[in-house]
Amino acid sequence: MLDANYWNELYAKGETGWDKGAPSPPIVRMLREGVVPSGARLAVIGAGRGHDALEAARLGYRVTAIDYAPLAVAAAAENARQAGLQLEVRQADVFALQGPFDAILEHTCFCAIDVARRAEYVEAVARAMVPGGTLFGVFYAHGKEGGPPFDTTEAEVRRLFEPRFRIERLRRAADSFEHRAGKELEAVLRLSSSGS
Ligand SMILES: C[S@@+](CC[C@H](N)C(=O)[O-])C[C@H]1O[C@@H](n2cnc3c(N)ncnc32)[C@H](O)[C@@H]1O
């Protein structure tokens, strides 16, 4: 069962092969591009040890790093402390996300949840953002069976998000980590209604 215990156990055993010890290159580029202006209230969901969240804080975003695995939250808080960065680190479930946020950063969270809950994910992120808010980041489209990480496709992202979001950008990232090259869809999705 994919729950906080499942993920926490992986952190406890050090089985965290997804963690490259650094922020995701396409996400750093998007932050630097300003797909959301610096200073925005930004939630980093499924934040793990916080590498993307710390980078966003470094660049001037008002960051809340959210994860439900206690060991991930503890590591993110410690990394923030060591880096001398101000950000909120919150232990919480993405499906009960409390906003309001101007933007939400997606990186290896969507692929970590049960596939049957993807429509619920769309509603949770939409509910937690201001109207016109932005969901951005990368979706993992690796083309393999099973998971986590669970595969997605450009067609599925469009089908799930288009009812609620304007799809401003959805394309293969050209600067992914080497082992994910060609398998990440970089996305900028603007919320068209608050959903409440
Ligand atoms: C594959 S890891 C990625 C972590 C981080 N984004 C990274 O790239 O290093 C997925 C993370 O999402 C968290 N997660 C999965 N489902 C969640 C949920 N429903 N609410 C909060 N966190 C969740 C897990 O605890 C785990 O830390």
Image (spheres, rainbow, N blue to C red):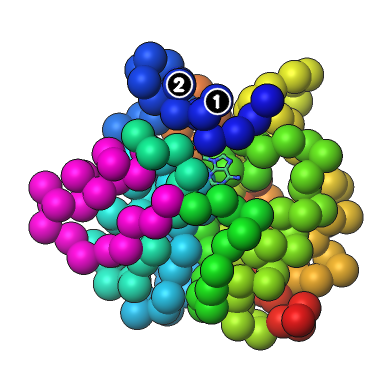
In the image, residue 8 lies in the stretch drawn in magenta: no
In this picture, residue 164 sits left or right of residue 100: right
State whether residue 27 appears in this view: no
The rendered magenta stretch, by its main secondary structure, is classed as: helix
Disc 1 under 8 Å from ligand 1? The reply is no
Disc 2 under 8 Å from ligand 1? The reply is yes
Q: Give the range drawn in magenta.
A: 72-91
**136 to 14, vertically: above or below:** below
- Image spot of residue 52 (x, y percent): 37, 50
Q: How far apart are marks 1 and 2 (CA)?
A: 7 Å
**Circle 1: is it few (<14), some (14-19), or many (20+) Cα within 10 Å?**
few
* Residue drawn at the location 71% of the way across and 54% of the way down: 121
- Image spot of residue 181 (x, y percent): 55, 30
Residue 115 occupies quadrant: top right
Quadrant for the C terminus in the image: bottom right
In this picture, residue 16 sits left or right of residue 137: left
**66 to 19, vertically: above or below:** below
**190 to 154, vertically: above or below:** below
* Residue drawn at the location 75% of the way across and 63% of the way down: 123
**Circle 2: is it few (<14), some (14-19), or many (20+) Cα within 10 Å?**
some
The three-letter code of the residue at mark 1 reads Tyr
> Is 176 or 36 nearer to us in this picture?
36
- Image spot of residue 95 (x, y percent): 65, 54
Quadrant for the N terminus in the image: top right
Q: Mark 2 points at which residue?
A: 10
* Residue drawn at the location 84% of the way across and 65% of the way down: 162
* Residue drawn at the location 54% of the way across and 73% of the way down: 99
SS at mark 2 in the image: helix
The three-letter code of the residue at mark 2 reads Leu
Q: Mark 1 points at which residue?
A: 6
Label 2 near label 1: C-beta < 8 Å?
Answer: yes
